């Protein structure tokens, strides 16, 4: 995975996801639990992709 990809991902997160998320939270007046779980899962996967201590053999790919 190259750095340009992760920078693009964070740009999408900041410019598209966060405004949409803020609108949803304001409309519903709460934060849907399943979405919070999925956000946490996504960040965990991204951090594993950049974990240099893992070897290809130890990573589980689906």
Image (cartoon, helix red, strand yellow):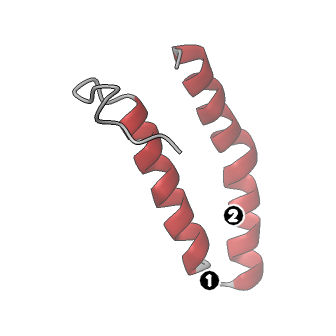
Name, please, the residue furthest toward the left.
Answer: 53
Name, please, the residue furthest toward the front.
Answer: 57
Q: Residue at x 54, y 58 (%)?
A: 39
Q: Residue at x 60, y 69 (%)?
A: 35
Secondary element under disc 2, as helix, strand or loop, is: helix
Mark 2 Cα shell of 10 Å, populated few (<14), some (14-19), many (≥20): few
44 to 41, vertically: above or below: above
For marks 2 and 1, the one nearer the N-term is 2
| Residue matched to label 1 | 30
| Residue matched to label 2 | 22
Secondary element under disc 1, as helix, strand or loop, is: loop
Mark 1 Cα shell of 10 Å, populated few (<14), some (14-19), many (≥20): few
Residue 20 point in image, percent of width and height: 76, 58
Residue 11 point in image, percent of width and height: 65, 32
Name the mark on residue 44. none
Q: Residue at x 53, y 45 (%)?
A: 62
Residue 41 or residue 62, whichever sits in front: 62
Name, please, the residue furthest toward the bottom.
Answer: 29
How far apart are the alpha carbons under marks 2 and 1? 10 Å
Does the CB distance between marks 2 and 1 fall below 8 Å?
no
53 horizontally vs 21: left or right: left
Residue 12 point in image, percent of width and height: 70, 37
Q: Residue at x 28, y 35 (%)?
A: 58
Residue 54 or residue 5, whichever sits in front: 54
The answer to which quarter of the image holds residue 8 is top right
3 to 14, vertically: above or below: above
Residue 6 or residue 26, whichever sits in front: 6
Residue 49 point in image, percent of width and height: 42, 32
């Amino acid at each position: 995975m190259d750095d340009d990809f992760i920078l693009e991902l964070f740009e999408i997160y900041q410019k598209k996801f966060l405004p949409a998320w803020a609108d949803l939270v304001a409309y519903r007046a709460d934060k849907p639990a399943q979405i919070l779980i999925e956000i946490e899962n996504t960040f965990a996967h991204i951090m594993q992709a950049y974990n240099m201590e893992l070897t290809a053999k130890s990573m589980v790919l689906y």
